[in-house]
Amino acid sequence: MAKRVGMEVSLAIGEAAKLADVDVVAAYPITPQTHIVEHLAELVAEGELDASYIPVESEHSAMSACLGSSAVGARTFTATAGQGLELMHEVLYCAASMQLPIVMTVANRALSAPLSVWGDHSDAMAVRDTGWIQIFTENGQEVFDNVLCAFRIGEDKRVLLPVMVHLDGFHLSHMIEPILIEEKAEVDKFLPRNNYPLPLDPDKPVSMGTFAPPIIYSEARRAQEENLQNSKKVVLEVWKEFGEQFGRQYAPIETYRTEGAKILLLTIGSYSQTAMSAIDKMRDKGKDVGLVRIRLWRPFPTDELRQAVKGPETLVVFDRAYSLGGQSGPVCAEVRSALYNQADKPKVTNIIGGIGGRDVTVAGFEEIINKGIEIADKGSGREFEIYGVRE
C-alpha cells in the first residue's frame, strides 16, 4: 500500500532513486537542484541506500563518472540544473552515443548572463539535441513516478539510452506536495535489477566511443537517431504498465478540456497546471478553449501532436525559452515543423514568457490566450510576442 507523504519534491526524487536501488550517484551541488543530491548523500551516509556516492569537483566530472559507472553495468543516477547542465554538455553526447542508461533529473534553471538561479527552460532547450530521452513533469508525483519509469525505459535492452526527467526549478523542485511513495516490493515488481548487456570487463577489453573517420560517422549517427526514435515504443509500453500497476497514467501528449475547442494553448512543464485553471475560467465564460501539454520532449511525439491539434482554428504555443536570433521559441519551432505539411493545421502563434522565474498567473494565461487569438486574427509585426516585458 502506497504511503501518502507531504514532502519537498526534491526529497521525493531522492526517495525514488532509493526505491530504484541505484548503485552509484555522482553529482555536484547547484541551485535549485542541490536538495536532491544532499538527500541522497544523507541516505547513503545513514545506510538507508547501499550505493557509492561520488562527490566530484564539477558537473563535467559528475557526468564523466556516470559514464564509467554505467559502462560497467551499475544503475547510475545524477541531477543538475542550469549552468551545471551546460558544464556537462559535451559529456551528454557521449552518454547517449555510447548507449549508457543513466538517469538524470534536471531542475530547470535560466542560463547566464545575467546570473539567475530561477527557473525557465533555456537549459533544457540547450541540450535537446544531445540524444537523451527527455520527459517533462508538472508536479511532484509525476517527477517521482517518472524517475522510476526512466530507469525502466533506459535500461530496456531495446533502448539502452540515458533519460532526463525535467522539473521546473523552485516552482516545482522546492514545493512541498502530497506524494504517494510506493512500497518497495511493488517497485521491485515494476523495476527489475539492471542487467546491462554490454558491461566493460577487464578480462575482455573493448574500446568505446573511439575515433570515427568520415566513412562510418554518418552511419553511426543514423543508427543513433533510429534507436532514439524507436525508443518511443518502449516509453509507451512502460507508461502503460506503470498505469496498470499504480493507477497513474502518462502519455507523450496530454490534453485538457479540448472537446469542441476552437482555440488551444500548448504548454510544457509545471506552468501547465496554472494554465488549466485559466482554461477552466475561460470555459466558464463560454469560450471554446482547451489545453495541450507536451510530456515526452525527446523523441518528439509528432503523430500524437498532430492528432491533438486537429480541428481547432488557433494554437497558441507558450515557450519558456528564447531561441536567440530565431523566428520563434524552441517549442514553437518544433510544433510548426511537425505541422508544416498538414492540410488541416491550425494557425500557430507563439508567446514567450515565464523567463528567469517570472510568474505567470491564471489571469496571465488568460491574457496570453487572448493575445494569441488576436494575433491569429489580425496578424503581428513580429514573429513572436513576449509576455510581461516592460517596454
Image (tube, rainbow, N blue to C red):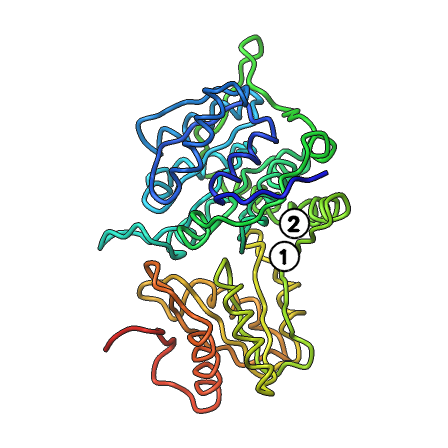
Q: Which amino acid does label 2 sit on?
A: Lys
- Occupied quadrant, residue 344: bottom right
The residue tagged with tag 1: helix, strand or loop? loop
State the CA–CA distance, disc 2 to disc 1.
Answer: 9 Å
Where is mark 1, residue-wise?
252
The residue tagged with tag 2: helix, strand or loop? helix
The reply to whether discs 2 and 1 touch (Cβ–Cβ < 8 Å) is yes
**Residue shown at 41% from the left, 73% from the top:** 351
> Residue 135 at x, y = what percent?
55, 50
Label placed on residue 115: none
Q: State the residue in front, 389 or 12.
A: 12
> Residue 287 at x, y = what percent?
58, 86
**Residue shown at 30% from the left, 27% from the top:** 57
Q: Is residue 385 left or right of residue 153?
A: left
**Residue shown at 57% from the left, 36% from the top:** 16
Where is mark 2, residue-wise?
232
Q: Is residue 50 left or right of residue 252?
A: left
